[in-house]
């Protein structure tokens, strides 16, 4: 099981108390749980000042939606991970990864989500997404074409360390791609910083299987 990225801390005080109280009422059936969850997610997606979103994030955490609830709100969670405020995006990212770990998130959806998250400036979110993609392809290599293509979105990230991490993920799983798929990554690699471009050209420029086999597999990526 993966280690989730940190979400908004459970701060003491009024926000924590009312979030816990509302979640308890919802779980007891006094309040309509589905409506409460929908309202929280809608607020987080609309956005506001961090102080105004914190309580809604806490309440969503306290409600602890299960995979069925997340799956029925998939579009909302994907949108929240893609463009929500940092803590809200982490909350959504964690929920979606749990869904994927349960085998309930399709490769196309994960690829589109990854492209969006990898374009975000927050390095912790990007690192978590790269680790997720790496794990997903390790678990099922048939997902490599969609997910590695999505990973190349990080080649344009302003942080060179992020670019390098994305390149390592691609190199590790390159043997699962055909020539056409590798060529698409070679084109994307032109966006890499100059310090990485030579290595990318060397690895991606030849036959995918041969190039990947010639590489010494890097150590397992840390979770974040």
Image (cartoon, rainbow, N blue to C red):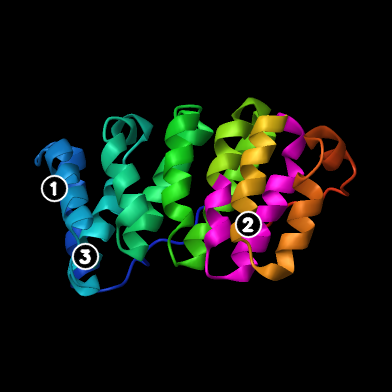
User: In terms of depth relative to the viewer, which is nearer, 24 or 4?
Assistant: 4
Relative depth, front residue between 74 and 30: 74
Chain-order first, disc 1 or disc 2: 1
Name the foreground residue: 143 vs 28: 143
Q: Residue at x 71, y 61 (%)?
A: 197
Does residue 5 appear to the left or right of 52 in the view shown?
right
Secondary structure of residue under mark 1: helix
- The reply, left or right, for residue 168 in relation to residue 115 is right
Q: Which residue is mark 1?
A: 39
Does the rendering let one see residue 200? yes
User: CA–CA distance between discs 1 and 2?
Assistant: 43 Å
Mark drawn on residue 53: 3
For label 2, the SS is helix
Q: Is residue 169 magenta?
A: yes
Residue 27 placement (x, y as % from top left)? 21, 40
* Sequence order check, earlier mark of 1 and 3: 1
Q: Is residue 27 depicted above or below 219 in this figure? A: above
Is 7 placed above or below 183 here?
Answer: below
Residue at (81% x, 41% y) in the render: 206
Q: Residues within 10 Å of mark 2 (few under 14, many from 20)?
A: some
In percent of width and height, residue 47 lies at 20, 62
Left or right, 142 with reference to 208:
left
Residue annotated with mark 2:
190
Range of the magenta residues? 151-178
Give the crowd class for mark 1: few <14, some 14-19, many >=20 residues within 10 Å.
Answer: some
- Please indicate whether residue 94 sits to the left or right of residue 60 in the image: right
Element type at mark 3: helix
Please report the residue visible at 26 percent of the width from the left and 51 percent of the height from the top.
60
Dots 1 and 3: beta carbons under 8 Å?
no
Q: Position of residue 43 (x, y in %)?
A: 16, 55
* Residue 71 point in image, percent of width and height: 33, 31
């Amino acid at each position: 099981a993966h280690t989730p990225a940190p979400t908004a801390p459970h701060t003491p005080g009024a926000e924590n108390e009312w979030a816990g109280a509302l979640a308890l009422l919802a779980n007891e059936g006094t309040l309509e749980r589905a409506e409460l969850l929908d309202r929280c997610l809608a607020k987080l997606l609309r956005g506001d000042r961090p102080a105004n979103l914190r309580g809604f994030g806490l309440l969503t955490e306290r409600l602890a939606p299960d995979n069925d609830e997340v799956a029925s709100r998939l579009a909302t969670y994907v949108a929240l991970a893609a463009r929500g405020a940092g803590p809200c995006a982490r909350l959504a990212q964690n929920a979606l990864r749990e869904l994927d770990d349960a085998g309930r998130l399709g490769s196309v959806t994960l690829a589109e989500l990854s492209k969006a998250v990898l374009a975000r400036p927050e390095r912790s979110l990007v690192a978590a997404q790269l680790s997720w993609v790496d794990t997903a392809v390790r678990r099922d290599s048939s997902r490599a074409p969609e997910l590695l293509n999505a990973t190349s979105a990080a080649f344009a990230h302003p942080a060179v360390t992020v670019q390098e991490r994305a390149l390592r993920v691609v190199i590790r799983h390159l043997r699962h791609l055909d020539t056409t798929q590798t060529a698409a990554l070679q084109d994307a690699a032109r966006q890499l910083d100059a310090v990485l471009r030579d290595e990318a050209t060397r690895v991606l420029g030849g036959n995918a299987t041969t190039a990947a086999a010639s590489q010494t597999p890097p150590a397992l990526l840390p979770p974040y």
